[in-house]
Amino acid sequence: MTMTRLSILGLSFLGLCAALLPASVAAQTIPVPLADTLETRQVAVVVTPGVRSMGQVPSARLRDLRRRMHQGVDLPVSALKELADLGDGLAAQRYARKLLDRPGASASDIAYYAAVAVGTGRVWTLPDMIKAMRSLDPATEPRTRVRKYISVLYGHAWGGNSLALDAVEEFNGEGRLFGALTDTTRERMIAQSGENGGGRLELKLALALLEDGAATGGMTDPQRDETRRLLEQAARADSLAARVTAENLLALMEAQYGVN
């Protein structure tokens, strides 16, 4: 497991400790997890079955193209796009990879066709999909495509894919691609993270609340209750580093706020 001493998911742990405790205590370091496991990143589900048989292909020409593709023929980009637009996951995966190799290719096209592929269970294209999504403008990205990204990411996240779960958290929020995070989605994220057993999402959300409290001069009672809930869940994670981090943060809260 990849680990670091002073930061988790881009948040400064040292700064948080300095805000909560005297310098002599804050100088202590706690190992925290930065990466999920390869196993949880490879969890695949089928969100949209797509084209599964020649009977779903509307013309003899397209059926011939699909047959040649499955025989290993390197089809022209235009042919791959035609098949991908039918919902063929293999064609969408190959078309997305062609786009990735093309300088100046549209990030929206890469994200969308990668999503078509991932939606059919081809999870190996998920990192490319997420990377392309980071370049999209929430104000201009077509809503039909955004709905596709949501269905694919949520489907995989709720199926246990930790990379998709991280992406659901990343793209939800004011001004972000998926818009404001709803309470329902937030609770589903937390519950799924608990099922995954990594503790990473709980720690990230808890640290955000702790940093906010440090920046504003103190935490409200609801913030303390929520932070404690998150940390207690993280303290039950499978990851030893996550458990140790959560337990130490709970101790920091007790020292600062009297939470026990």
Image (cartoon, rainbow, N blue to C red):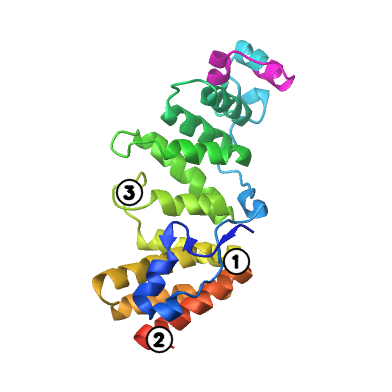
Does the magenta segment cover residue 72? yes
Residue 248 image point, x, y percent: 50, 78
Start and end of the magenta stretch? 66-82
**Is residue 86 at all visible to an observer of this figure?**
no
The quadrant of the image that shows the N terminus is bottom right
Judge from the rendering whether residue 119 lies leftward or rightward of residue 181; answer left or right: right
Residue topped by disc 2: 255
Residue topped by disc 3: 179
Cα separation, mark 1 vs mark 3, equals 27 Å
Does the magenta segment cover residue 14? no
Task: Give 66 or 240, whichever is nearer the viewer.
Answer: 240
**Is residue 172 at all visible to an observer of this figure?**
yes
Q: Secondary structure at mark 1?
A: loop
Amino acid found under the numbered disc labelled 3 = Gly
Q: Residue at x 58, y 64 (%)?
A: 198
Dot 3 or dot 2: first in sequence order is 3
Amino acid found under the numbered disc labelled 2 = Ala
Dot 2 or dot 1: first in sequence order is 1
Cα separation, mark 3 vs mark 2, equals 37 Å
The circle drawn on residue 197 is 1
Q: Residue at x 63, y 47 (%)?
A: 44
Residue 38 image point, x, y percent: 66, 51
Task: Give 198 or 58, whichever is nearer the viewer.
Answer: 198
In the figure, 195 relative to 68: above or below?
below
In the figure, 109 relative to 205: above or below?
above
Quarter-wise, where is residue 237 in the image? bottom right
